Image (cartoon, coloured by chain):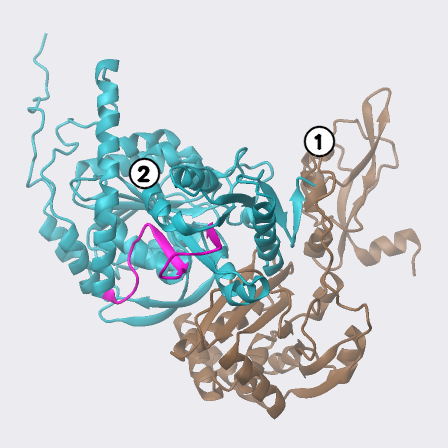
Amino acid sequence: MEVIGRELDRLLQEETIEIRGDGRAGSGLQLTMQTIAATAVANRQLHVQEWPFFSSARKGAPTRGYLRLSRRPILKSSDITSPHVVVLMDEGVSRFVDFAEGVSENGLFVVNTPLDPERVAKKYRLNGWVITIDGDGISEKYLKKPMGNISVFAVFSTIISALNPQKSRDMLKMLLEKRHIPKSLVQANLDLFDASSGSFKVKKCQFKGENDHKPIHFDNYGDLAPGAQSRLRLSRANMTAAYAPSGFILKFDDPKDSCNGCALCVMNCPENIIQFKADAKQGLKVLGADVSSYCKLCAECIEICPKELFREVERAEEAREEGVS
Amino acid sequence: MSEHPFVETPAGALFPKAIDLEAVRRAHKAFATEQDVRYADGNTAAAYACLQMWRMILVGGFPITPSTKWLETVSTVIRSGQVGKKKIKLLEAEHAVADYLAGSAAACRDVIVSTATSSVGLDHMTESTRSLGASGLGNVLLINVYRATANYPLCIEGDPSDALAHRDDGWVQICCRGTQQIYDTVIQSPCIGMNPEILTPVMPGYYGIKDSHRSSKLIVEPDDKINAFQDKWISPLNLPGLINGDTGLGSCVTSKHFQGFKINQRSRFERVFEWLPKIGRDFEKTFGRPGLEFIEKLHWPSDEAVDLAIVSMGPDIGTATDMVPAEEKRLGIRMGVLAARLLTPFPYGAYTDLLKRAKVVLVVNQAHHYGDGHLGTDIIKACYDLKERPVIANCFAGMGGATVSDDSWRAMIDHALQAAKKSEKLPAPVVVHEGRVVWPS
């Protein structure tokens, strides 16, 4: 811990600490970043820059946050691509983004997970210092719901000496009180902060392979024909199926061959995933929808289809119907 | 036939007591009574500055990303009664907002009316912003949070194509970077617009997301100090308002007079060159932070002899400034970095003066343009009369709010120096992203 603290102090003094976080909308990632930044601003010697990566505001959508801290004015404005510290607030998003991409050698990983550092490092093939804290678990005890953000904030208040644990706690209290939430809830959050302060594990690990977490090479924009907007939106980093409510999936059923070829579903689908074939009689016939990556269950097709051929089903039910165990 | 029920008032009537300015002043409650260090994003900083002016009593609003938080903050604070009696009017579209501002500003030229908008929001206002630009209503304050205007495809991040598409609207346009500069610029803006020699609405602007949503330290000044500063520069105007129907908005004139109005508008515009630096210097003296200036010299040697001058605008120029020591070492050259502040009217002379000893000028444009870029075209003109005209390399980077990485800056610097080696005085513009020239490919 002392080594981490010394290195972060050095960076703060001589350069700029660059922190990048990944989580889901509603997981408290932005609040953590903002609370660290507000605490830093209260320390008049520190300069700070904090901003969210803008994406769908729908709860559960992958989100990203950036934070720079320094004792010198911060001029740099570009995105953080080689962070010194990364936060993984919700392990679920690791399916969609490489949270460790471009992390500098011997970087620091702060992961909200019940796993110990070595298991996390092995799982994600990480090199550097790994700190794990079961933020969701601790939060269940104090807030009756999984919210790792206070615990992750407690980790930062401990490892960055300029933030100071007591001042961080005071700032947290002030920010919570500003929200006019009940006193009991403010106290529960502070208890959660206190409980988190000594509950994290740290270990230096070496599990990264030669080709792991390399920044994606930009290879120009390719051929963008007019009308290519939906193809652009359906990028690797924005697999909109991640925004769908967990456990549900879109289902198309047309056992009586009743699709009338009105094409309303095709025109209204914002993700361009309706599959159809040309039909000599009625123009087209809808065959289904490619729900593998981009169906966010917006329900436009369900609402618009005059024959009620689309519906939302539980994934388990779908699996049963498909005969998948 | 009955007599007309309305009594026509003589043209030019002043109605000096129609609005009691002292009552407006008394109705203002201080948002901050002493200097305070806060943590805020660009939208919040701009909102705070507006809320702290006693003259700012009317807000018209229609939300559009990324300016929405300005409206949310202003609405929340006004509705809470924290800043006294002010009115917020939410309207059905941006055009209605601009009309509302025009009407209310004309009704009393001594109060400030404001709004914030972005992108197509500003486009929707165009009919009115063009009229406002010519109207002499310098008490209209429009915060422009930059976002690309084209919605094909829609992109909500920071790109100044909206501001640059509206340069002919006739507003004073000032570009900001960073939370503190946004706050300070909004405070100074009405001092320019309401100057009796200028009387032109002001549009301070900043990049959407990159600055509107980026939070950092913000020094909030006490309202008393802000208002004392503005009171030095803003005096009641002895001009007729809308009340007697004698307004420039909607009047029809013949071609005999139209050009005369435009010459008058242009003459008022030119006065910005004299007053803006004076207001900026007084701001610096009063608040101890840099005030308004034509160009921000982020890194500029006192002898002005630079091998490479970088000219751009907005927060990304900060990244270039951060790289200067390493780049000077890598290339063995002297570099300078300038950030555009006053966009309209464009201070050609100031650039001519600064760039007279530069060998190569790299202009980084961030809005789509079929030629050399909006900024690039102006810099070419500024350098046209120089005895030793520098190489001017125009690049495009960060369009649509894309990040401009260290690698991209290096690629643009190398591109400019390569052009100089080949003795190309004005190389064709290129688009750069992620450290490489992506157009022409």
Q: Residue B301 colored magenta?
A: yes
Q: Residue at x 55, y 87 (%)?
A: A158
Over which residues does the magenta segment extend?
B287-311
Secondary structure predominantly adopted by residues drawn in magenta: loop
Q: Is residue B257 above or below residue B301?
A: above
Q: Is residue B409 above or below residue B156?
A: below
x, y percentage for residue B249? Answer: 24, 27
Q: Mark 2: which secondary structure?
A: loop
Q: Answer left or right for A32 relative to B146.
A: right
Chain B is shown in which shade? cyan
Q: Amino acid at mark 1?
A: Leu
x, y percentage for residue A303? Answer: 68, 39
Q: Amino acid at mark 2?
A: Trp
- Check the residue under mark 2 and report the chain it is in: B
Residue B135 visible in rendering = no
Instruction: Give the CA distance from mark 2 to mark 1.
Output: 45 Å
- Which residue is tagged 2? B171
Q: On residue A264, which mark appears?
A: 1
| View extreme (top): residue | B1
Q: Mark 1: which secondary structure?
A: helix
To which quarter of the image does residue B123 belong?
top left
Residue B253 visible in rendering = yes
A253 vs B123, nearest the viewer:
B123
To which quarter of the image does residue B165 belong?
top left
Chain A is shown in which shade? brown
Indicate the quadrant containing the C terminus of chain B: top left, top right, bottom left or bottom right: top right
